[in-house]
Structures are given as structure tokens and as C-alpha cells.
Image (cartoon, rainbow, N blue to C red):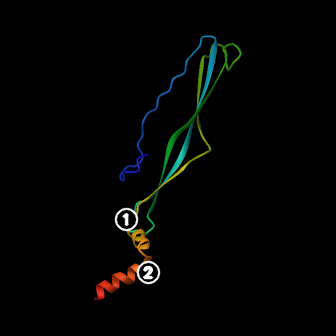
Amino acid sequence: MNTNDYVNPVHHFLDDYWVSLDPNRGVFYQSYFKNNILNLYDDYLGFINALVTRNFYQHSVDKYFTMDVNAGTGVGCYFEQDFKIDKEYDIYERKVYSLSNVLSDTGGFYNSLFFIGLIIYS
């Protein structure tokens, strides 16, 4: 995820892994992926709650164990791979520092409008 990219914040890439195989041992490998949530608040004015929600998958964890080739999942099975969707998920948020945040930081929204109105009136 690239927080500086406002057009396409989720970038996909391939990750590689390796498993050492032994002729007398089988490997059972499980890869878990989680469905994450991305909440984007990209409104520069800040008066409208323009929430954009996106989902993306992320590789979370790998688990593996070894077993005897003759007593494992099957005779002669040296490698077995499972891909599973994880029940856990992460929530990422991006909030842009907006005009309403600037007004609230400089003395509150009401006082800022009062000051702007005073400048326009005089």
C-alpha cells in the first residue's frame, strides 16, 4: 500500500518463497491470506464525508511441518500446498489534512468563520 498515491493506493507485487525438500520427508505447507480493508478520506475541504472503502488481499503467514513420506498424507507425497483465507483482517485508514482541520486548529470552526466574516465585512 502506498499512502502517497491518491489514484491507485494499492500496488500488487509477487512474493517468492522456497521450501527445502528431503527425499525421506514430506512437507505440508499452508499459506494464509487475509482480506484487508482500506478506508480513504481524501476530501480536501473536509465538510463532506467522502469515504472510499477498498478491499485487498495480503499474504499474512506461512505454516509448514514435515512428515514421514510413507506415513504422511500419502505414499510418495513429498510436497503439499494449501492456500487459505485467514479470518483476521487489518483496517488501514488515510485521512487528508483538510481545510476544516485547519480552521478547527486555528481557534475553532465558529471563531474562524466569524473572523473570515469580519475581514469580508470590513
Residue 44's disc number: 1
Q: Is residue 93 above or below residue 58?
A: below
- Quarter of the figure with residue 21: top right
Residue assigned mark 2: 110
Q: In the rendered image, which quarter contains the C terminus?
A: bottom left
Q: Is residue 44 left or right of residue 64?
A: left
Q: Nearer the viewer, residue 46 or 112?
A: 112
Q: Amino acid at mark 1?
A: Tyr
**Residue 58: x and y, percent?**
51, 41
Q: Is residue 84 left or right of residue 72?
A: left
**Residue 111: x and y, percent?**
42, 81
Count of number-bearing discs: 2
Residue at 56 percent across and 42 percent down: it is 34
Mark 2 or 1, which is nearer the eye?
A: 2
Q: Is residue 57 above or below residue 93?
A: above
Residue at 36 percent across and 82 percent down: it is 115
SS under mark 2: helix
Q: Is residue 14 left or right of residue 77?
A: left
**Residue 103: x and y, percent?**
40, 73
Q: Is residue 46 above or below residue 55?
A: below
Mark 2 or mark 1: whose residue is earlier in sequence: 1
Q: Amino acid at mark 2?
A: Tyr
Residue at 46 percent across and 32 percent down: it is 15
